[in-house]
Image (tube, grey):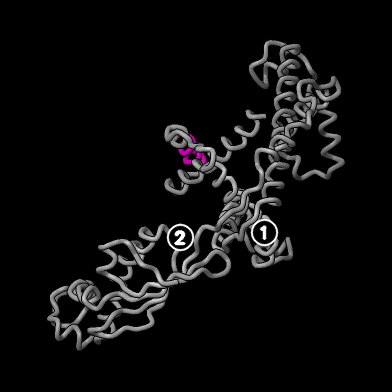
Amino acid sequence: MQKNIQNEALNNMIENIVVKKLEQSQIEIIGSIKASFFESFKLKAIENINNEINIPGFRKGKVPETILISKVGEMTILEEMAELALSQVYPEIIRSEKIDAVGRPEINITKLALNNPLEFKIITTVMPEIKLANYKKIAENAVKEKEDVHTVSEKEIEDAILKIRKSKVNHDNHDHEKMTDKEHELEIEKNLPELNDEFVMSIGDFKNVNDFKEKVKLSLIEEKKYQAREKKRILISDQLIQESQFDIPKILIDSELRRVEFQFLDDIKRMNVKLDDYLKHAKKTMEEIRKEWMPYAEKKAKLQLILNRISENENITVDKSEVENEVKHILDHYKDADPEQAFTYAETVLTNDKVYRLFELKN
């Protein structure tokens, strides 16, 4: 449909704008930049090209206009003018029309000529319209399922303590990787430390065996609480995805896929394993692995859009200081991490947690 843009500054730049919805959360913007506005970028275009080109006998940036045009051609000047004009016009269209664009637009110039309007077609991805599931009802049903997370049995405590004693043997013995499973098991049984005050004080801040057992018990209770909470959050998440209705933009799935791949490559690096060796052992190509990740990436992207919309509906925000503390923690552990990306990641994680906590508090 043709748009009557209520923006005087933008009307001085463009004309004949048509905005049309496409499939998969994309829109098409067709229009033209007025010839007078387009021509206003000629001097800047010539200056930019002059500063980049090397012509024998002239200093960079000091090539006379006529010689410059004869060397690079008029079309090169027009293309630079078009890039400059569109880089100013596109953001203005987005702001004026309140278009919630995602990612880089696909820009095509359909008419480019001197003393003529610059005609263009832009295709860009936009945030989808989401028909949210009844998230309050979903959360209410999820928390109805009660679990006993405040008690642990004596056997659970004994099993946890045995695991700690065995891990002590593994920590002290650096040759266990060379052993067979049976040899390793025998080695553990042979060197299993006695459960006494001396042992528990050697592995942590424990007064005696009774104090150690009590703290193991409390730790197991906290782990049960965490597991129960995560189980409910997964249940809520799955229902939110299933019952909300919208088309997920491919660009968001691709973004999530890149994040998964980055984490995978980082994990491989930390294990001191070469990627080629890993792929050879797994008998897979990276393309096959990416294909396996695709359903997970799509699910994660959908869930994030839903949580974003719920946080908007419920006016959920996080304090900047909270985000900065989390960013510091990330950068301390990942020295090569990009601070800006770390901030976005931290803000997203903390906001998501507040959304889930809202569900849990309300019910």
How far across and down, in percent of the image, does residue 62 sit?
13, 75
Q: Position of residue 135 (x, y in %)?
A: 65, 42
Q: Quadrant of residue 115?
A: bottom left
What amino acid is at disc 1? Answer: Trp
Viewer-nearest residue: 273 or 20: 20
Which image quadrant is residue 286 in? bottom right
Residue at which label 2 appears: 101
Q: Which residues are magenta?
A: 325-333
Give the image location of residue 251, x and y in percent: 54, 62
Q: Residues within 10 Å of mark 2 (few under 14, many from 20)?
A: some
Lower sequence index among marks 2 and 1: 2
Q: Secondary structure at mark 1?
A: helix
Please tell me the numbered disc located at residue 293: 1
Q: Is residue 158 above or below residue 126?
A: above
Is 54 situated left or right of 291 in this image?
left
Residue at the spot x=64%, y=17% of the render? 205
Q: Image check: 202 left or right of 26? A: right
Q: Is residue 351 above or below residue 282?
A: above
Quadrant assignment for the C terminus:
top right
- Assess whether residue 330 is covered by the magenta stretch: yes
Q: Nearer the viewer, mark 2 or mark 1?
A: 2
Residue 93, x across and y down, in percent: 36, 64
Q: Is residue 269 above or below residue 356?
A: below
